[in-house]
Amino acid sequence: MPYPEWSLLREKGVDGHTGVMRLRPLKYVAPHWLGVCFMTTALTISALPYSTDPLALFAKLRHRPGAVLLDSGRPKATTGRFDIVSSDPLATLTMTPEGDTRLSSDMLTLPASLAEDVTAQQQWLIEQLPAVNVKSELPFLGGLMGYWSYDLGRNRADIASQHPAATRLPLLRVGLFDWCITLDHVKEQAWFVGSPARREQVAAWLAAPDTPTTPFKLTQRFSPELTQAAYTERFDAVQRYIRAGDCYQINLAQRFTAHYEGDEWQAYLQLRKATPTPFSGFMAWGHQAVLSLSPERFIQSRDGLVETRPIKGTRPRGKTPDQDRALANDLLSSTKDRAENVMIVDLLRNDLGRVCVPGSIRVPQLCQLESYPNVHHLVSVVQGQLASQHSPLSLLTAGFPGGSITGAPKIRAMQIIDELEPCQRSVYCGSLGYIDVRGSMDTSIAIRTMVADDGALHVWGGGGLVADSQAEEEYTETLDKIRHLIGALE
């Protein structure tokens, strides 16, 4: 275990990180509940022993209610910086597949006036935490963590699905967290963020005996929902839409399903070992879980600077250095992949432009090669300055779901996706991440993501189709993107 010496926690913090929450009354508090003391005492930021990865730490909290890991994939993935671990949220907001929201909390009750607006409900939740006047480069000092599913975005776009839900997972599931442990892999530091009462409670959880876990195993191998012939029929339909002028690009995906038994956390450990990525995450509750090994940032907002990093263009890694370089160079020189990437950059410039300061949108990186353990990608960066009248939640809403996993134009692309894909997408192509009480946000695109639902494990592979795409190549690409995930478990 990487944190055996909780005596190293210091009441006054370290290196100028001492901070105090500016307190204000809570409106819907049950005074008898222990959580009151967490939210009406000082926030402190205390040093912990540093560890290179968060897995042993999270394993101690795995069975706590609402446990969440936002994982940078370190040390093998080198582009991420922070890992964030927490559990036991003060409240959990979910939306059922039918569109009904539910708040689970012993201390908060949603105002009736917000009943029809899930974005306003989330903003209201964040505002129940006292404001923070701490200057810290740590990404999360309390706020929301969880996921927003692709189908939440489809519903917001008023696209009624023709197909059954892929899972019974909520359309969104976010917790209101007042504490976390953060690992900073650039400065090689670790920090506890939370009240002294929370710190003592978390120390007790980490010191408790390990909870017995059941080994994970597949009881049935992954099988595709579509045959190659069925995929090709849908590919051909996309080409007809493109020639007719309905769209320029469609991200078409197929789903694979296996059955399993045992602890989903053990499956995540196997997946992470096979493919560490900078925007990974794990959360589980009941007989459901999200296991995400995403390489792609959706939207980050910090001090008003907004950034999105769309991925378009993929090649597998080579078996030899020469083959690997050849595949990378082939991707860099591909006119088709570059055009696909640029289309999505234009879409995202438009999405961000709705909530950013006019004239602030720029593209500092266009179609740059990034290499991961199993694939090469082309990655671009789009940035802007968030307008003062907009919040991170309105920014998330404006861009959701990410254009890199819909196509262009977005709404028509989503309509065609729903027509052609035989089931809804669930968390796949949605987002995982956090929205901080100070107004910071970082979210992923939930690709390379497995969704566990009552003994069934689902994974999707997809890719962007344009006018000069070839059916067999695109079908193979959907397999390349998830072959390492399936192989890690089979």
Image (cartoon, rainbow, N blue to C red):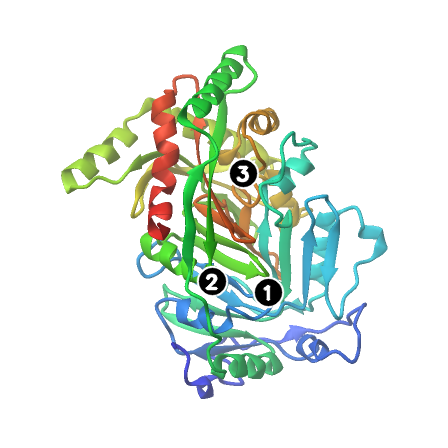
Q: Residues within 10 Å of mark 2 (few under 14, many from 20)?
A: some
Verify CB contact (< 8 Å) between mark 3 and mark 1.
no
Residue at far front of view: 219
- Residue 478: x %, y % from top left: 39, 34
- Compared with 62, 340 (above or below) is above
Task: Specify the amino acid type for callout 1.
Answer: Gly
Label 3 SS: loop
- Residue 308: x %, y % from top left: 49, 43
Of residues 138 and 444, which is closer to you in this image?
444
Q: Nearer the viewer, mark 2 or mark 3?
A: 2
Residue positioned 35% across, 23% down in the render? 472
- Compared with 382, 485 (above or below) is below
Verify CB contact (< 8 Å) between mark 1 and mark 2.
no
Report the residue marked by disc 2. 263
Of residues 46 and 33, which is closer to you in this image?
33
Pick whichever of labels 2 and 3 is earlier in the sequence. 2
